[in-house]
Image (spheres, rainbow, N blue to C red):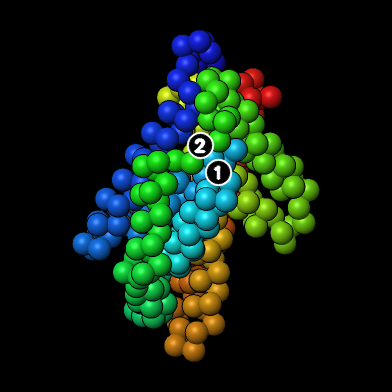
Amino acid sequence: MGRHADQSPPASAVVGHYLKDHAERLRQRESEMRDGDPDGIHQVRVESRRLRTALAVYRPLLDPERALAVQGELRWLGTTLSPARDLEVVEGHFNEAVGAEPRSLVAGPVRLLPKRRFREAADPARAAALEAIDSPRYADLQTALEAFVDDPPWSSKADRPATKELPTRLAKPWRRIQRRVESAAVAEPRDQDMALHEVRKAAKRLRYACDVAAPALGADVERISRKAEQIQDVLGDHHDMVVLRQWLRRLARDPDAGAAVFTFGRVHRRAEESASADLSQYAPAWERLHKRAAAVLD
């Protein structure tokens, strides 16, 4: 896997480059978010997650207290931005689903009512997101992150060859997703959606952890990242349909729904079918990831 140990850079060089690169990307995405880029909030969340994953998975190479402190603030940032992004996603899926309905079956305030309700939820969520990146806490996070990536507090393990040290670190997120898959397989029906969401998060963690190590470990780890991304995408689409159905049930109970209840029901059924189709792709996607990752990381 990757280079021979005597040709390998130290683990610190690989992880340090990733941290510095994505700290800079976070600043760029923040600027785009401030400028009103429609994808800005999402991209800030992505970069905060990537950095958080790197600090979590590769923490043994760093001073654990300092890494945990920065990781915790990145988690705060992602959590604060999450409601605004989640509403963007569900509104997009709703509009797409209604647009697929025959015009003769679109009744009542099918577009007007959801637009109003989404805005009532999204406006304060977006305001909270913008307030967060204008806050002293975010300024302190950027200051701490810049100091951290400019002069990382490496532990002695960081001096080891990347080809020896990084596979050891990747084993942990690999074991995590295996545990999550096993839990989802035995979950009660009422708990399965949440269990699959946990699998998705574990797949994302494995993917991002592989992306840190891939420059040193090569094609094998790049392939694992791509297989993990397939799991993430399939279960991401499934989760989106779960959230959309929750919104549709809420809209159907709205006192102002009127005849739109009929169309909401049709869209709910469409979302159920889409979620089932996503689940049909999950097992083969997991088999592909398991085959690839077990050969490299077990």
Residue for badge 1: 63
Residue 283 image label: none
Front-most of 148 and 42? 148
Identified at 45% across, 83% down, the residue is 257
Task: Report crowding for label 1: few under 14, some 14 to 19, many 20 or more residues within 10 A (C-alpha).
Answer: some
Across and down, in percent, residue 16 comes to 42, 35
Across and down, in percent, residue 20 comes to 36, 40
Residue for badge 2: 154
Query: On screen, 183 above or below 219?
Result: below
Across and down, in percent, residue 228 comes to 54, 36
Q: Secondary structure at mark 2?
A: loop
Front-most of 157 and 240? 157
Task: Report crowding for label 2: few under 14, some 14 to 19, many 20 or more residues within 10 A (C-alpha).
Answer: some
**Badge 2 vs badge 1, beta-carbon distance below 8 Å:** yes
Q: Amino acid at mark 1?
A: Asp
Q: In the image, is 102 to the left or to the right of 230?
A: left
Q: In the image, is 297 to the left or to the right of 97?
A: right
Front-most of 246 and 13? 13
